[in-house]
Image (cartoon, rainbow, N blue to C red):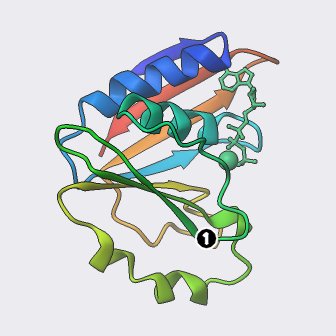
Amino acid sequence: MKHVSKSELQTKEIAAKFARKLAGGEFIELVGDLGAGKTVFVRGMVEALGSTARVKSPTFTIMNEYPVQGEHVTKIAHLDLYRFDDESQLSALELEDYINDKTVICVEWPDIFGKSPFEPTHRVTIEHVDVDTREIIVNEL
Ligand SMILES: Nc1ncnc2c1ncn2[C@@H]1O[C@H](COP(=O)(O)OP(=O)(O)OP(=O)(O)O)[C@@H](O)[C@H]1O
Ligand SMILES: [Mg+2]
C-alpha cells in the first residue's frame, strides 16, 4: 500500500490507520533515510492506540516500551539500531522471547549491520520526496 504524506500530521494519520488494524504480535521494520519520518510514524502508532507518551528516538536506552490500550495490542516496543554501537547488544536483547501476541515491535534501521537479522511481518518504507513530502509504502511480508 502506497501513500503520499504532505506533513508530519498526515504521516501520523497514516500510521494511526495502520496501527488500528494490527492484531498483535507484529514485527515492523521501518526503512528510510535520516529524517525520513520513521520515528514520527511510530509516534502516530503509539498515539492511535491511546498512549499520551511522547515517542522519542531510543538514544540512551536500547529499546523504549510504550504501554498502549489497543483492543489487541497492549505494548509497543521501539528500537533504533542506528544508535547501537555493536551488534552483540542485539542478541543480548533476546527479541524472540519478547514477541508475544499483545506486543508489537518497531525497529528503525533494521539492516544497519548488513542483512536484517529479523523475520519481520511488515516493512514500512519512507522516501524523502521534498521538505514536507514523503512517500510511505507499507508492505505486509
Ligand atoms: N510528511 C512528513 N512526514 C513525517 N515527517 C515529516 C514530514 N514532513 C516533515 N517532516 C519532518 O521530518 C522529520 C522526521 O523526523 P524523524 O525523527 O521521524 O525521522 P527518522 O526517520 O526517525 O530519522 P532517524 O533515522 O534519524 O531516526 C521531523 O522533523 C518532521 O517534522
Ligand atoms: Mg528515528
Which SS class for mark 1? loop
Left or right, 104 with respect to 3, comes to: left
Dot 1 amino acid type: Gly
Q: What residue does disc 1 label?
A: 114
Left or right, 101 with respect to 98, comes to: left
Give the residue at x 33% y 64%: 119
Give the residue at x 58% y 46%: 31
Q: Examine the rendered structure and indicate whether residue 1 appears above or below residue 34.
A: above
Left or right, 28 with respect to 90, comes to: left
The quarter holding residue 126 reads top right
Q: Nearer the viewer, residue 102 or 5?
A: 102
Q: Examine the rendered structure and indicate whether residue 75 appears above or below residue 72.
A: below
Q: Residues within 10 Å of mark 1 (few under 14, many from 20)?
A: few
Q: Examine the rendered structure and indicate whether residue 4 appears above or below residue 113.
A: above
Give the residue at x 37% y 33%: 50
Count every numbered label the image shows and give the total.
Answer: 1
The quarter holding residue 64 reads bottom right
Q: Residue furthest right?
A: 131
Q: Position of residue 90 (x, y in %)?
A: 53, 81
Q: Position of residue 131 (x, y in %)?
A: 82, 18
Q: Examine the rendered structure and indicate whether residue 86 appears above or below residue 78.
A: below
Q: Position of residue 93 (x, y in %)?
A: 46, 82
Q: Which quadrant of the figure contains the N terminus?
A: top left
Q: Position of residue 98 (x, y in %)?
A: 31, 73
The quarter holding residue 134 reads top right
Left or right, 57 with respect to 89, comes to: right
